[in-house]
Amino acid sequence: MTKKLILSFPAQATDRSLTYDLVKRWDIRINILKAEIEVGREGKLLVELEAPEEALAEGLAYLEGYGVQVSPVANKISRDEKLCVDCGNCASACVSGALTIGEPDWMLKFDPEKCIMCKLCLKTCPLKLFRIEFAGDGV
Amino acid sequence: MAKTYSEINEKIREGRAVVLTAEEVSELAKTLSPAEIAEKVDVVTTGTFGAMCSSGAIVNFGHAQPPIRMEKIELNGIRTSGGLAAVDTYIGATDCNPERPEYGGAHLIEDLVAGRKITLEAWGKGTDCYPRKYIKTTIDRDTVNEAILYNPRNAYQNYCVATNSTDKIKHTYMGTLLPRMANASYSTAGELSPLLNDPECRTIGLGTRIFLCGTEGYVSWNGTQFHSTKEENEYGIPTSNARTIAVIGDMKKMSTEFLRAAYYEKYGISLFVGIGVPIPILDEDMARRVSIRNEQIETTIVDYGDGNRQLGKTNYAALRTGEITLDGKKIRTAPVASIAKARKIAQILKEWIERGEFQLTEPVRPMPTGTSLKTLK
């Protein structure tokens, strides 16, 4: 199974190669979508982890044992479709291809699966139609 | 066989006019000659919906009792012109209060069109005939005498393609330009665009009746920065931004479906304006002009990161595929003007004409020729 997660590393965990352990010990495939890491300070990784369910559960428990906070990416970008004018500004800025516009109808399409939460669309939309929606458990 | 405006309007009144959108006629031109199109088609409708910063509104508030000669005017905290007699103001689309950069003139204009209430505060020094010095009240679309959209420069003919070669993101009115030419944006409706279907303005001039923000409007003058001597390609299309039109219309009849305020991060406020211009197919030359296709419309790629340096040329068919190649580098492309709305506008204008509700007007004064632009020293 594949899970999109935010891994928050506390300062004392940033000098251990925990992600290497995930690969070597549980054969978890890691796709790093975004990283903000400084050695000696708290770091954040936005990752996609792919492995059989059990291996994934053990790997995540291992991380939590080192004080890494594991948060599912339950929050997502949402858009007010009723007010959208299909101008294309957001699609122009979207590097992950989650927002696209083109033939045949030139109406904006949004594929949340491809979103890497860079939040450029929130700033770019000239009508300010994008919002981050948070999941109930406050991720 | 040439047609006159009278003949075309007679057909419109009788419900017999043959009207096509600019996309439909460009498709037809693949199989019919210009002469055949000139015979069969009476009017071609065009459309565009993009950010047009040089826009604004003239509003007359009416007089209070006792009356005030407004010298300083604020609408929802935004300063608008106090220099137009006692109770007239001009709201510029890009006017704003620096402390609140995200809400400005364009938003006031949209609020007026939408029927929303606006706080008006005004000050005057007091004169013998206008003794009042201060007023604070609420106005809206229905309380004011007139609310007229008065746009000095709209519907740019063939705006350039914007890209950014620097290492930093550039936030512009052409959208967010990513570093190292990762993207390029274009703001045009291509073969639907009004001034690309009559590039020399043979039929577009002072008094031309148009679709403006959901109602009828008029071309009121040439737009500012009217450049009519730009280099043209073999299809008679200027290959960089050239002509413009000034437009005017009654805001009380407009719709926010075709008029929307916009805010561009770090750049400021602008106004999305929906315009549709009907082109009468007077002769074979006009038939040839409206048959223009996206691959025949070339434009210039400009580096917004490096003093607007010209980087090369491309065409709208290539741009609309979502990717162009410049000097061997692939660049992702996207519009920042709504092609979907432009289509809708051209379609609505077509329906108005087919139903006999909209007749064409012959320009009272043609657009200037032989013009170019001065720079500011």
Image (spheres, helix red, strand yellow):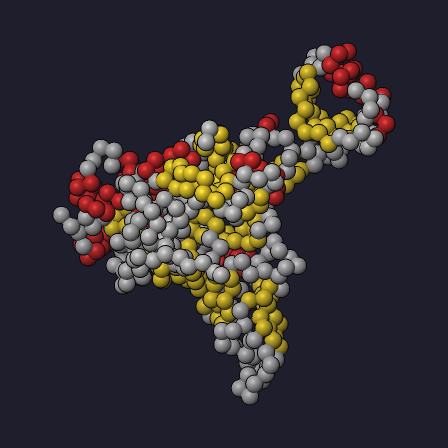
Left or right? Give the position of B42 relative to B22. left
Quadrant of the image containing the C terminus of chain A: top right
From this viewpoint, which residue is outermost toward the left?
A: B1
Residue B106, how many percent across, how many down?
53, 57
User: Could you tell me how many numbered marks the image carries?
Assistant: 0
Among the 4 quarters of the image, the one containing residue B247: bottom left
Left or right? Give the position of B283 relative to A80. left
Camera-nearest residue between A32 and B148? A32
Left or right? Give the position of B195 relative to A1. left
From this viewpoint, which residue is outermost toward the bottom?
A: B128
Residue B344, how many percent across, how many down?
39, 44
Quadrant of the image containing the N terminus of chain A: top right
Among the 4 quarters of the image, the one containing residue A137: top right
Q: Is residue B252 visible?
A: no
Residue depicted at 68% across the width and 33% down the height: A75
From this viewpoint, which residue is outermost toward the front?
A: B377
Residue B210, how many percent across, how many down?
34, 55
Camera-nearest residue between B241 and B272? B241
Residue depicted at 37% across the width and 51% down the height: B242
Residue B224, how many percent across, how many down?
41, 59
Residue depicted at 55% across the width and 54% down the height: B269
Image height of B108 relative to B242, above or below? below
Residue depicted at 48% across the width and 50% down the height: B51
